[in-house]
Image: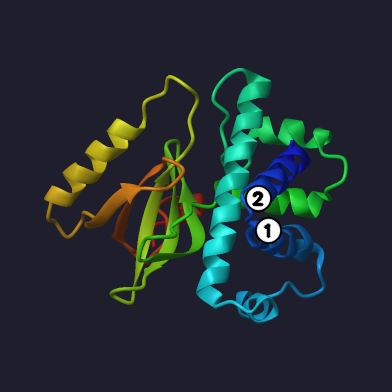
Amino acid sequence: MFELSVEDLRRHCAAADKQVPFTLFERYDLDGPEAAERPTYAHLGGEFGIQETQVTNYLAYARRQFRRFLLERLRATTGRRGRIRGGVPALARRRRAVKYLSDTVVAHLRTVAVWPDLSGTRYELAEPIGRGGMGTVYRARDRSLDRPVAIKVLHDLPEGVQAEPRLVREARLTARLEHPGIVPVHDAGVLPDGRFYYVMKLVRGKRLDEPAAFGRPD
């Protein structure tokens, strides 16, 4: 499944005269996970004679297309809307279809497939910090205001499950509330792949289940 999607991406980029995005995807996302030292964006920019921001944009384009092709193949195989989430059983079951990509590369491509594309926004993603039934929360940075934020991104859900309206309502209601115990909402939008997201204040601290696991409050 993954290898076929990579081939779909290669053909698409060749037909669209976008060989540079695919070559960068190949160098960073296919060769990089197994390399002794993965090339940095700055290194790739120097190698291709382009700015680091262009490397970021080209990779975002290639990853966005790869994700689209992977979803199309999942839908064709399952007969319903494919789900891409961290540790999705549907993807894990289909790993045996991958013949030439190593486990390391497949694991990396799974991360690439679920990683939100925030190109065109003022936010820079850092790492996932929490996952729930409807979405995943990521630590990020607001480049315009130079401050850390948390971004909640809606999962791809099975066809017929309408979670987006609920998440939109949740964001709007939370944004209207002002209370020390409520995390303020700063922004909201839709990713290029159609997933809804909203941006919140990053609250530092421990999860409620962590002290409970030891049987004592902190």
Q: Is residue 76 above or below residue 172?
A: above
Residue nearer the viewer, 129 or 40: 40
Residue 92 visible in the shown view: yes
Circle 2 — which element? helix
Identify residue type, mark 2.
Answer: Cys
**Residue found at the very far right of the displayed protein:** 99
16 left or right, relative to 184 = right
Q: Position of residue 124 (x, y in %)?
A: 44, 66
Give me the residue at 38% from left, 50% from top.
Answer: 152
Give the mark nearer the N terminus: 2 vs 1: 2
Q: CA distance from mark 2 to mark 1?
A: 6 Å
Residue nearer the viewer, 91 or 183: 91
Report the residue marked by disc 2. Answer: 13
Please say which color scheme the image uses.
Answer: rainbow
Give me the residue at 47% from left, 22% from top.
Answer: 159
| Label 1: how many Cα within 10 Å (few below 14, some 14–19, many 20+) | some
Report the residue marked by disc 1. Answer: 19
22 left or right, relative to 96 = left
Q: Is residue 27 above or below residue 145?
A: above
Residue nearer the viewer, 138 or 69: 69
Identify residue type, mark 1.
Answer: Gln
Q: Position of residue 64 (x, y in %)?
A: 55, 49
Check if mark 2's residue and mark 1's residue have beta carbons within 8 Å: yes
Q: Position of residue 148 (x, y in %)?
A: 36, 70
Image quadrant occupied by the C terminus: bottom left
51 left or right, relative to 166 = right
